[in-house]
Every structure is written in C-alpha cells, then in structure tokens.
Amino acid sequence: MAIGVLCASAYPSLAQAHSKPKPPNGVEEVCSIAFDQDAIRPARLENGALPCLKEAARKLKERTDRKLVLVGVKDPSKDHELAENGSMREEEDATGLDVRLEDLSAYRAVNTKWYLVRYLGVDPTRVIPVTDESYFAQTVTAYLVPASADYNHNFLGATKTNEKPCTITPCYSPDEETLTAQRRSRIPENSAGQPLPETHADQLELAALQRRRAASAKQTAKEKNSEPPLTPLPARPTPEHPATTSIIP
C-alpha cells in the first residue's frame, strides 16, 4: 500500500527526520550501510556495503558476549514506491524488484543479515534484524548489544522484523507476517579486499530479474483473462415483474 500522506503519529517531525538517536549505555554503534544508489532494487545490498559488513562480522566474532542488531531505516522523501509495487505480492517476490515502501526498512535489515550469514560466516542466532521509524534515512546501522537481546528486548527500542526462517529465540507467533531475504551474489573484491564497483555482470543480473518479473506478470494476466466469466444473477423479482421460475426446489 503506497503511502501518500505522512501522518504525525506514524513519522517523526521534519526537525527530527534526519537525526539518528544516540545509542543507550551498553550499546556500541559499529557502522552504517547506505542504500541510496539502486532505485530499482532499493533493499539490495550495494557493493559499497562490504567494508561495514566485514567490520560488523569481525566485531561480532571477537565479542562472544555480544549480539548484533541491524536497524533498517527508510526515507519516504527519497525512497519512492513504484506505482506497480505490491502487484506481484500474492507470493513474496525474491527478485527485490517489488518491494512495497512499508516493507523497505525491514527488507534492508533482513537482506543485510542474510549476506552476513551466507558469505561472512556469522551465526544467525546472534543477529537481530529490526526497524526504526523515529528518523528518516536510507541505511542499515549495525550495533553491538548485550547477548541477552532478542526480538522484543533489543536494547534500542526498535521494532522487530519477522525474518523467515526464524533464528532468534523466542520466535514470533506463527500467524504473524514474515519476510524472506532477497539474495544477491557475493560482492567482488580487489586484491586489497575492497569492493569493486558495480559491473556489467551486475547490470545483466538486473536485466534477467526484470525479464523474469515481466514474464511472471504476463503469465498472471493470461491466467486471469482465461478464467470463465461469472454467470450473472437473475434480476430481483418485483410486483410488476414477478419471478417466472420458482426458486424453491
């Protein structure tokens, strides 16, 4: 569902919109990842995220008494929902091309966790993806928090994100909505371990995703058009035009 008007109850004031809250005592901010270059896939980890990803993984592995909280944030003034977004969401869209604005913060956090676990060997039970609506940004910020943290007590007052599959104990209720990470290929590095810029291969990957999405939309439209039309109900009887056929068996 597109968000057209920003309500005071749902979003911070303009004066606070870009002010990230200071972490509480006992919580260490590690680094932030920007999601401001790929408007087509706004929740996709960009290649420039690699240094922060490595730093977060390193610190978590060194600090066995800590967990990692990933706070996903969106900026409605910069993150613009495409008109057709949500149209492919009868089932989750794994391509990342059909992210609704309301889900954007959560997908950013969940996608970041997936990369840490898949490519950097991080223990999924020690990474908690959450969201924060108290300020606007196009980021995921990583924080080290005490090991007792869970979805409901993450030391940052942030909102839990129900990733699928659940790896944080206790899990969310099975009837709650969940999100599955939108995967990407491993970020290429140079000899110094720094990320390489987006390449032609990345553009080919995007083009392939767009073709698959278009084909899926075309198939859905074809199936919808092939459904037999509904038989119209007979007109309601009136005193002037009583029913000519009894409806009683």
Image (cartoon, grey):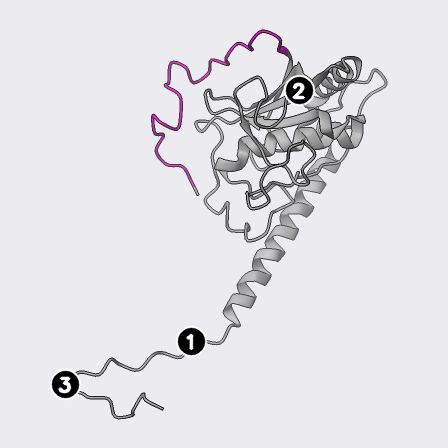
Residue 44 place in picture, x, y as percent = 64, 33
Which residue is drawn at the image coordinates 61% and 56% (left, top)?
216
Residue 226: percent from left, percent from top:
53, 72
Badge 1 is on which residue?
A: 230
Residue 129: where, in percent of width, then height? 62, 28
- Do callouts 3 and 1 mark residues in contact (Cβ within 8 Å)? no
Residue 40 x %, y %: 57, 37
Alpha-carbon neighbours of circle 2 within 10 Å: few (<14), some, or many (≥20)?
few
Residue 138: quadrant of the picture: top right
Q: Earlier in the sequence, mark 2 or mark 1?
A: 2
Residue 54 occupies which quadrant of the picture? Answer: top right
| Residue 51 in the image: above or below residue 93 | above
173 or 96, nearer to the observer: 173
Residue 148 badge: 2
Identify the main secondary structure in magenta: loop
Which of the two residues, 47 or 4, is positioned nearer the viewer here?
4
Would residue 112 be found to the left or right of residue 81 on screen? right
Label 2 or label 1, whichever lies nearer to me, is 2
Give the residue at mark 3. 239
Query: CA gap, disc 2 to disc 3?
Result: 74 Å
Helix or strand or loop: what does disc 1 sit on?
A: loop
Q: Earlier in the sequence, mark 3 or mark 1?
A: 1
Above or below, 159 against 245 in this view is above
Assess disc 3: are there few (<14), some (14-19) or many (≥20) residues with their C-alpha within 10 Å of its C-alpha. Answer: few
Q: Amino acid at mark 3?
A: Pro
Amino acid of disc 2: Ser
Q: Are marks 2 and 1 in contact (CB under 8 Å)?
A: no
Magenta span: 2-28
- Measure the C-alpha gap from mark 3 to mark 1: 27 Å
